Structures are given as structure tokens and as C-alpha cells.
Image: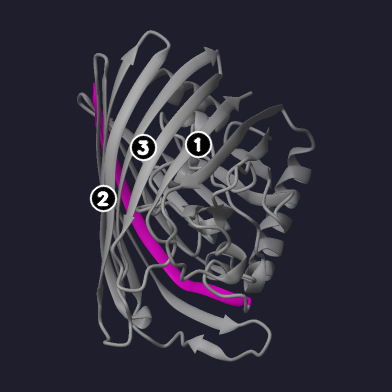
Amino acid sequence: MAQHQMFMGICGGSRPRVHRTEWGHSRLFFALSLGLGLGLAAQQARAQEFSGSGFASLVVGRTTGGCVSSGLAPAFSKGCTRYIADWGHAGVYGDELSASPESRIGLQGTVKFNPSFSVTGQVTARGLKDQHANLEWLYLAYQIAPEWTLQVGRKRLPLYYYSDFQDVGYAYNTIRPSPDVYGWDVVNYNGASLSYATELGPWSLRTDLLFGAEKSSKNAYSRIYSDAPKTVEWSNIGGASVEFSRDWFTGRVSYVRSKFKQTDKDSGVVDVAEDGPAQEFLGLALNADVGHWIVRTEFGRATRKSLNYKAQFYLATLGYRVGDFTLTGGASSYQEDSYADSYTPVKLRSQLLALRYELHKGGALKFQFDRVSDSTVTPGAGSARVLSASYDMVF
């Protein structure tokens, strides 16, 4: 896992949190957090250490295949085929070569005032329209004890294994984690997390508790299906995760729940009320690095009764590393069941084949072929074959 170890250095020892900033009703929370940080910084009177790092991905891709009907918004329904590569940012490929859906660059800086207190921020620019430069995350970190760390601010919502570092393409061997698993309408949260890290014999253990909220105005995920801008809110977010590793094995279990609300931004009409049942997300990752072999598996379940569905999904990849080359094959699936006759459940299955070449230290070239089968009664993006290539780097 050489590339993963290098990546961890970018984050100052923790996974990064990334996404477009939506301050929403958490503006007061941020003002208080930032005010606290500035007050403590003023008391310290000097910064003892500053560290900076970054990442970038130039990704090009296109779809091929026979013409299929589209259930997406008109802006994403041009051409014969289409592929949703990044649900959270509305990154959609069509049958013309494009670098916009997934290309990105991020810059991160951390100011450490003393061994216990630091402030970290990150700005990310994307090739997508209206996402050219955004403050993706900003949080204060306080190390309560060697094993305990409190972080307050804007962070990545750690629903699943790759969530924390999903934007850092260099950190994994495929061009993207499977959209069948990593495709949700909210990617960040404003709040706090408490982590505990320790060693139990030969095992390394890390646990995290989190709470917060997120308000996404002109939500990108909703824009994939509707031209009418939507405001999506996840309130009362609460969750926990446990990550455990030993030698060649790493596992992770996670649980997150929240209230959900969706509003038409222009009219103010509430599409989905907040007083419905809480939505729940459960995830399990089991990964292994044994010699030249690299195994990545992830299984998840989402229960969203207020949106009339529940879903089961998984991804599984097997890679083999020889020198500077890594060949990876895999499959993924996303299957919904409906709580209401009026809702059409989504049914997706995908296969991939990817080749990674370590071009230089901190930089890699990747080539990938995906085949997507959409068996939904009324397809969204529809079935397609996808060709993509990327140059990913950390610096």
C-alpha cells in the first residue's frame, strides 16, 4: 500500500474531507468555531508549524454503446449513452470525450499552534460548471490526549471506506471508487467528531463518533434528474465507525443516520418533509494486501423510507501488482426495493478493468473500461460502456 502511505502524509496523519461548501443554517456554528479558533490562536501568539500539500486528477472519458433512452434532466440526456461517474457533484459523461466531469485539484494547509491545537483548511477546484473553486473543508483539531482527538468544523461525511479521501485519485488503483456505492446527495457535514486510536496487541484500532448537519443549496445530485434547483438538508446527523487493521488486513464498520428534507429552491415548496423517518446507512469494508495481490470489498445498505426506497450495494475488486504496473478487475451492484408502488426502484450492475502505471513518485497514469447494465424499469442513465483515462498526483 505504498501509495496509501504516501497519501496519508498529505493529511497530516488523518484522512481528508472534501466537497463543495454549502454554509446554510450552519453559518452560526462555523462563526462560533472559527471565533474560538482565532481566540486560541491569538493566545498562542505564534504558529509553530505550517504544512501544505495537494492533489490533482486530470480525467478524460466518454461513453459508447447502442442508443438508450434517458430519464435524466435534459442537460444530461444529450447523445446516445451516458454515465454518472460522480453523483455528489453531477459529474456525467456522454458519448463525446470530456475532461469536465471528474478533473479536479485540491490544496490543503494546516497551521499547528502547539502539539495539541491546529487548524486545517482545503480548497478544491473542479472542471464542472459552478464548481471552479470552493472551500471544501475547514476544521479545528484539538488533541485531548495521545489517543483522543476532537475536530470541529466542516468535514467529509465518512459514510464508507473511501469517503474521506474519495477526491484523491492517487490513493486508489481504479480511476474512481464505484459510483454504485459512492453516490449520495450529501458529501459533507458541519459538526464535530471525536476519534480514539490505540493498539490492541497486534491490532491497530480507530473509532470515530460524529454529529452535525448539512444544507446543500442547488444540490448537484438532484440536478442530475431535474432542471428545477433543489435544496437538500440532512439534519441531526449522527454516526460512528470502527476501523481495525493487522498486517495485511484492514476492516471498517460504519453507521450513519439523519433526518432528510428536500425543498424546491425557487418556489419554496417542500418536496420531502423533515418529519419523516430517519434515513440510515450501514457499511462494511474488508480489504487485504497480500504480496502482489490487492483485494478491496465493500458492502452497504441504505434505508430511506421518506424517499420510498431501501438499497443494498457492494463493490469488489481484485488487483495484481507487478513492478510499476497494477491490473485491477472488479464488479459492483446497486439494487433498490420500493416502499411505494409509485416509486420505481433503481437496478444497476457494473464491471470494470483498470490498469495503473506508477509514472513517478507521487504520480500515476490509469486506464479503465467499465460496462454498466441498467435494468431499471424506467432507466435513468441507461446501460453504457465507458472508456476513461487519468493522470493522478499528490504533491
| 377 displayed left or right of 168 | left
Q: Which residue extends farthest left?
A: 201
**Up/down of 352 relative to 29, above or below:** above
Badge 1 or badge 2: first in the primary sequence: 2
Separation of marks 1 and 2 at Cα, in angstroms = 22 Å
Q: Which residues are magenta?
A: 229-253
**Residue 147 appears in view:** no
Q: Which residue is mark 2?
A: 314
Residue 262 x %, y %: 52, 80
Can you say whether 188 is above or below 250 in the image?
A: below
What numbered label is drawn on residue 369? none
Residue in the image at 46% along x and 28% along y: 367
Q: Is residue 67 visible?
A: yes
What amino acid is labelled 3 in the image?
Answer: Ala
Identify the secondary structure beneath mark 3.
strand
Mark 2 and mark 1 in contact (Cβ < 8 Å)? no
Question: Which numbered disc covers residue 388?
Answer: 1
Q: Earlier in the sequence, mark 3 or mark 2?
A: 3
The mark lying in front, picked from 3 and 2, is 2
Q: Residues within 10 Å of mark 3 (few under 14, many from 20)?
A: some
- Nearer the observer: mark 1 or 2; the answer is 1
